[in-house]
Image (spheres, rainbow, N blue to C red):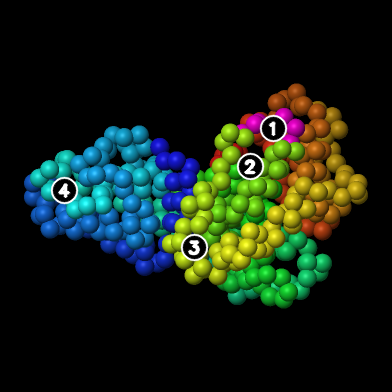
Amino acid sequence: MPSRDFEADVAVKIALMEPSDIAKLGELLELAVHVSVKPLDQVPSILADLLVGQLSRFMRDVLELSSDHDSVLGWDSSAPGCSNLRSADAAVVVECLLALTSSSASAKPAKIKPGIFYQMKMLLQRLFELVNSVHEEREFSDFGWQWNDFNAGWESADSNCDYELSLVCRALGSHDADWLPPKDPAGSGHMPDFITYWFSLSAVVLGHLAWSNPALGMARWLNSGMPGDDGVLSGLKRLYGADAAALILNRNVSELATKMIHVVPNHLDQSEDTFDPSEALIHSPALVSRISRSRRWAAMLCGGSDPLQLADHLESLLLMPGPREVRLSGGSDAVSVPNVHLLLPNSSGWSKSLQRHGDKLPVRPDGRSWRVAVTSATLGYLGEFRRSRETGLWFAGRHASHMLGN
């Protein structure tokens, strides 16, 4: 199975693919389909050389990966992960495709194992499906996050509540077509470009999805084609699309996630499984060059160790509750309805307040989980949360989505 570094590498490379790159993958698939319909002994050597050569160039030039295998003859289609291609994620598919390529010339068709071109076609079909799912066309608005009266910018941190996170939370809770993500969320005024964009994504991943390992969770989600879940992930895909993968490379978000789980009593200890992208990936010259061509990604990752000062602001938002009283409405006994409300005087430390007060709720005799609706006086309604029996963390949405990053 692919390593976590490899999973992250593939996810980032797929997210950064240009339309021309996707077109090249489509052309490669067409060629593989054409070759695979012929019996092996009838495949012209020129077509076999062309297909294997183009596949090798695609891996090297587009995905910037190279194979350690000596020859296409060494590939085993029954290897773990390669046998069930219909459900394989992008990291598994790319690993199998790399095993079909070599740094030298391809083998002669007469020496290639039977069925190799059919397997190549199946792998390319799955990769093309996943890439298209990640880059599926989205509608955009010329205005803010979704509403025509949004001012498309900000003047200061004081006059805008937590960099418009309230608008993003409202968008996440909307499952109709009445809102659209912004065409250009760079913003205006005195704050850095895209601070709303990246701050809000990070806050949702840490606070709503409660991913203790955000880089791993994002890599898994993207390599699976960014499937929707009728919840938080569906909203994030609509708002961010492939841009969400930039979170994989931001150490500040990963480090804060680690800090968050350390304040959770009885949390499932996953210290040995903590994952951060490798230095080689973050500082790859080819990757840095691609990132610099994207205004959004560059704002997130270029210009210092924390160009948007995400660490301090996210920590204040999620882990530093103020002295003012927090009210928990309902849940006073174990036989009441499973819904309670957490009312916060402001947004400061809302995640820690939820964890602290939610963990004090009595055990229900019916075995059901408490559902806590969280509302902040400044941010508004944040969502409905419940506690995972596996991680001990409070999350919103589907448990499967929560577990992607845990």
Q: What residue type is labelled 2?
A: Ser
Q: Mark 1 — residue?
A: 267
Q: Mark 4 — residue?
A: 107
Closer to the N terminus: mark 2 or mark 3?
Answer: 2
Q: Kindly report the distance in space between the C-alpha atoms of the residues bearing marks 2 and 3.
A: 26 Å
Closer to the N terminus: mark 2 or mark 4?
Answer: 4
> Which portion, as a residue range, is magenta?
264-270
At mark 3, the secondary structure is helix
Q: Quadrant of residue 22?
A: bottom left
**Foreground of the two, 339 or 126:** 126
Q: Mark 3 — residue?
A: 288
Q: Kindly report the distance in space between the C-alpha atoms of the residues bearing marks 1 and 3.
A: 36 Å
Q: Which amino acid does label 3 sit on?
A: Val
Which of labels 1 and 3 is toward the front?
3
At mark 4, the secondary structure is loop
Based on the picture, tell me whether residue 268 belongs to the magenta stretch: yes
